[in-house]
Amino acid sequence: MHSINAERLIGRIRELGDIGRDAEGRLTRLAGSANDKAGRDRLVGWVEAAGLEVAIDRIGNIFGIWRGEGNAGHAPLMLGSHIDTVINAGIYDGCYGVLAALEVIETLKDLGVTPARPIVVAAFTNEEGVRFAPDMLGSLVHVGGLAVDAALATIGTDGAVLGEELARIGYAGNVEPGHLQPHAYVELHIEQGPVLEREGTAIGAVENLQGISWQRVTIDGVANHAGTTPMAMRRDAGLAAARVGLFLREHIARSNAPSVATVGTMRYEPDAINVIPSRAVFTVDLRDPDEERLQALEAVLADFLARVAEEEGVEISVERLARFQPVVFDPAIVAAIEASARTRGLKSRRMTSGAGHDAQMLARIAPTAMIFVPSRDGISHNPREHTEPDDLAAGANVLLDVVERIACSG
Ligand code: GLV
Ligand code: MN
Ligand code: MN
């Protein structure tokens, strides 16, 4: 049984986690930003130093390719995740999977192993989707789910065009997306939820991932004086918007389903203390592991918006930002993850991913699965995100075992 170099892995996670901090120490590397460039440059430096071939495709996905001797005719095993972050992020989300993939490759190289197929570390563009929608955009383009030119034309929340931003930071590569069709894809990630820590379980063998629906809702009412307009005479876009988040929470509680709903952004116009909002623009993120239930939740939301429009005297329009169906991962890779955990004396459990991941896209073109490790207090998308060093090492060692099983067994 081999082991990765935990010190090297954790050192790199911390080093990458220091790139892109503002004066208050907040970490933000939004896709296509100058901070993203700085993180990418550091990653590419490590990939080159490891002796891997670097390929950058037109949507900015970064690939570090280890072509062992005599395996040229074989489809590669792909490992990876993303290094873009949310606003005021933690240091593990995505970066752990990319750097552990590199660590596994370097470990195998150090051991003198000759893989039976190329092994690739991938860092996909704009997984988070904070600046450009949809999320998982780079991996979606990689699997052919979105044309590269359409993806490059995506307008960000700040009005920037993704293609122009990638060119500006030097990551508009020239390789056609999808040039590497993997034999299999494995992604290691922090759980970002409370299950593993609560149970004292070291390894999550992720067997499925829930569906994701992102919509942007615009409500138009009428601006008027906050002091003089009687409550019954208002067409208040802000109040109408506020009803939506509350309704979703109450509906899900009543339905007893595992669905989750989040209103994560909200913007009022004119955004003034004494003016009834004429416009509210907000996002709704709905998720459920069951496609039918997710569709039903979307329909319930649509009905409620129609009712609110009627009752509040406002106009409502909806734009779809992302829609991904739930996926079921490859049972053989899930079993290989469990077998590795067993051999190493690590407690494991099968689980569903609540977060979206590039694996959700890769599962469209190759057998895919994910490995999770515990997140302290179940916190993520937050600077308090933390995973214990032993857990980070354990997850990377399980990834190493799975890689050896898939790519080094001849
Ligand atoms: C990605 O982090 C997502 O699940 O939104
Ligand atoms: Mn992630
Ligand atoms: Mn994330």
Image (spheres, rainbow, N blue to C red):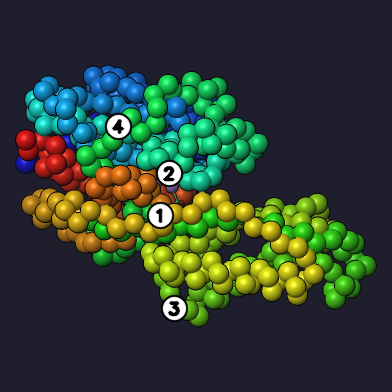
- Could you tell me which residue is drawn at 25 percent across and 22 percent down? 52
On the image, which quarter does residue 305 sit in? bottom right
50 or 92, nearer to the observer: 50
Q: Is residue 17 left or right of residue 285?
A: left
The amino acid at mark 3 is Asn
Q: Check disc 1: other Cα within 10 Å, few if <14, some if 14-19, many if 20+.
A: some
- Residue position for label 1: 355
Q: Which mark is residue 154?
A: none
Q: How far across and how far down the image is residue 250, in percent?
A: 56, 76
SS at badge 4: loop
Q: Is mark 1 within 8 Å of ligand 1?
A: yes
The amino acid at mark 1 is Ala
| Above or below, 203 relative to 300 | above
| Above or below, 56 relative to 182 | above
Tell me the mark number nearer the camera, choosing from 2 and 3: 2
- Could you tell me which residue is drawn at 62 percent across and 33 percent down? 160
SS at badge 2: loop
- Residue position for label 3: 256
- Residue position for label 4: 180
The amino acid at mark 4 is Leu
